[in-house]
Image (spheres, helix red, strand yellow):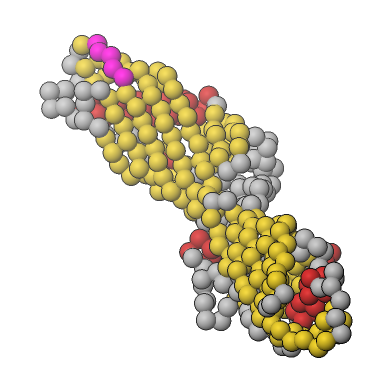
Amino acid sequence: MRKLNMWCCVVFMLSVPLVGLNPAALHAETPDISGLEWTLDSTITIQVKKAGKDTQKGQSILYIGPNLDEGLIADQWKMIDPDGDELSGTYHEKADKPGKGFFHLEPANLSAYLLIKLETFAADGDVTDLAIGAPQGNLYPKVMENKKGLTFTLNSKIKVDVSATVEGTPESSSTTLTLKLKGTRPPEPLEQDTEGARWFFNTTNTFKIKGLQKITDDGDADIILGPNQDRELASNEFIGMDQGVELLRGTYTRNKKKITFTGPDLENHLKNIVEEYAVEALLQDPDNYSVTDVQAEITNLKMTATIKSETSGTIDIKLKFNGSAVVNGEYGEGKGSFIVKGDGAPVL
């Protein structure tokens, strides 16, 4: 005997469009960083040969265009370091590292930025007529997605020849500017649309009663989360679907990416499924020829869905029950469990 299809074995339409996470990054591709902003832990060192060095630590702000507030169009960037000095330019994915998360930040004002740092370095000395040659070096940051969000990392050295008049004497030297920047931009919070996206999950369902052989089979699944005006759903309500037909309603709560489902319809639906599984499990015993009056009392139930990204989610049901039945004319009792686990993706 086959049991009820877990709606039909658990079908979900999650109305949780996610923002801020780039699906490409999930496949080790270079993320889209346009329009983003980072707060970066920064170590900026200016080292002048034969004169010493100065290290500055603090936080820098990095803006990626387009950003109207900062005057940036697409493919432009601007960094403001802990001293308020600005380094800016254009960017693109690093040509020889496609799909690896590397970018090329091409500064437009690097010479001016270096002069500011050198003037600050030499402010306490008798230094005039500062001039620099063409800076040599590149800015190749790496942006990667992980559980904490998008991480920006840059380790770069820029070298330049320097000339100046020191205490009245012309001098020439070389300078190295070292930039070490790192920061993580957290994922955007989940947002909810009024119409809801559809998700489809493939599931594995496992049913156990003590003393009987367990049953494991495959299922699939469909839920709609409110608010949804067409379905008359409030913001904390959901519908379980079966092949396009409404099967049950309930309520849900959400904590970041985790959604927890509750409600009497849900419990009754799962109770019916457990009883169907129980009949099948009992009839697997070759000594059982009659199974009647099967009853299940749910003692513990937790049903959740977790949205990992725009393209990936999971479902998890853990249920325990006390059961009874009349088998071959004799009344008996037992305990069991029902577990559903699955992975899914939105249906476009």
Considering the whole magenta stretch, tell me its main secondary structure.
strand
Q: Could you tell me which residue is drawn at 52 percent across and 43 percent down? A: 306
Where 169 sits versus 301, above or below? below
**Rendered-image quadrant of the N terminus:** top left
Q: Quadrant of residue 49?
A: bottom right
In this picture, residue 257 sits left or right of residue 128 = left
The image position of residue 59, as x and y in percent, is 73, 57
Residue positioned most to the left: 287
Q: Could you tell me which residue is drawn at 28 percent across and 14 percent down? A: 333
Q: Could you tell me which residue is drawn at 51 percent across and 71 percent down? A: 100
The image position of residue 84, as x and y in percent, is 82, 64
Q: Is any atom of residue 339 visible in this view?
A: yes
User: Which of 311/236 is in front?
Assistant: 311
Q: Could you tell me which residue is drawn at 61 percent across and 67 percent down? A: 154
Q: Quadrant of residue 280?
A: top left
Q: Quadrant of residue 152?
A: bottom right
In this picture, residue 102 sits left or right of residue 83 = left
The image position of residue 218, as x and y in percent, is 33, 44
**In the rendered structure, which segment of residues is drawn in magenta?**
331-335
User: Which of 286/16 is in front?
Assistant: 16
